Image (cartoon, helix red, strand yellow):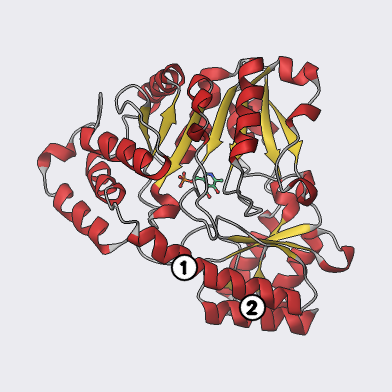
Amino acid sequence: MRQSDRLSRIPPYLAFEIDRKKREAIAAGIDVIDLGVGDPDRPTPDFVVEAMTRAIRDPRNHTYALGAGVREFRQAAVDSMARRFGVQLDPMKELVPLIGSKDAIAHLPLAFVNPGEHVLIPDPGYPAYISGCILAGGVPWPMPMSEETGWLPCLREIPSAVTDSARMLYLNYPNNPTGAVATLSFFREAVAFARERDILLVHDAAYIDTWFDEPAPSVFQVPEARQCAIELHSLSKSYNMTGWRIGFAVGNAEAIRHLAFVKSNVDSGPFKAIQWAAAEALAETDGTSTRAMNDLYRRRRDLLVAGLAALGVRASLPRGAFYVWARCPDGVDSLTFANRMLEQAAVTVIPGVGFGAAGEGWFRMGLTVPEDRLREAVERMRKVL
Ligand SMILES: Cc1ncc(COP(=O)(O)O)c(C=O)c1O
């Protein structure tokens, strides 16, 4: 069947072949250690599941989440922004509930980008930024990042012909795939850059609760961000709720209004029972759940980074998110390396080139498997390397 031009412009998923081989190996009964996934292995906290169980029995939650949706969810979300980042937001005008942060990544370009206009995208970065941009007719402009710059893009190096036609700038910290965490001074620079050029700054904060040394900042800790930015929050990674599909966007009231307008034409908001359960999660004021997960990921990170170092594989020490971003040994390209790991060690890793050209020479391993499996993965890699 004929597909639209915009679909054919979406770049192929480079790790597709590895994915296929992984599924074949598992079907053939091989014990594959899958470090390729970005999905927490721990369950959603009990108190959230219990809140959902109560909410789902209430017929008032069985209807469309039209209008404001569940006001208590909005309030719990702005309260948590105030508690964690000292940022005061209007729950009605400066927030919209999301069906996961990917919801906004797909829909924001429809509200802000005309065909042919640019969207500035981190390279390496989460591939959905590119697809969302292309689906809206926009042109992605990769901003190469490197270890030398702490995996922060050099905004001033983007040609003015591109920034003149750029409508959106994506940032993502804690960063997938590199584990970098941005400083407030970088956010200040990015906010000034976006304001000078009238670009919408979109900070994808899907991993903002997952940090190891110091809390990851919100872009709204820069007061002027209110004038030019929107920030995407998600309960997927923070509360092990990937399958539930719940998050929220906060920020510039006009940007929120335009995003809400697109969404009102596409979906009718997240299921109300899920909003109630998410409100319960966000109201956990002492941070018990996120702290427990961060302690777990920190132990896994230290184990894996040390294990890789013993093999002579250098990793960029992640400060947040739950991935280890490591250098392919012996100058081998990332697809070849990932294939070799799967075929010879039965360990799945994601080749860095799958996150963009600047990811070549690197690979990503997830911290979403127990410590004994990580040890086993390192041992298997040792035999191959
Ligand atoms: C950087 C980044 N942003 C957004 C998402 C989407 O998360 P969700 O839609 O579950 O909130 C992911 C998922 O892996 C991600 O890695």
Q: Which residue is mark 1?
A: 295
Q: Residue at x 49, y 59 (%)?
A: 39
**Horizontal placement of 299 versus 88: left or right?**
right
Secondary structure beneath disc 2? helix
Amino acid carrying mark 2 in the image: Ala
Residue 284 drawn at (x, y percent)? 28, 53
CA–CA distance in space, label 2 to label 1: 21 Å
Secondary structure beneath disc 1? helix
Can residue 1 be spotted in the picture? no
For residue 100, above or below residue 27: above
Crowding at mark 2 (Cα within 10 Å: few <14, some 14-19, many 20+): many
Residue 278 drawn at (x, y percent)? 29, 47
Amino acid carrying mark 1 in the image: Asp
Disc 2 versus disc 1: nearer the observer: 1
In terms of image quadrants, where is residue 341? Answer: bottom right
Along the viewing direction, whichever of 168 and 11 lies nearer the viewer: 168
Q: Residue at x 47, y 37 (%)?
A: 232
For residue 357, above or below residue 375: above
Mark 2 near mark 1, Cβ–Cβ under 8 Å?
no
Residue 184 drawn at (x, y percent)? 58, 39
Query: In the image as oriented, which residue stretches furthest toward the right?
Result: 331
Q: Which residue is mark 2?
A: 377
**Horizontal placement of 35 versus 144: left or right?**
left
Residue 231 drawn at (x, y percent)? 48, 34
For residue 347, above or below residue 241: below
Q: Residue at x 74, y 74 (%)?
A: 309
Label for residue 27?
none
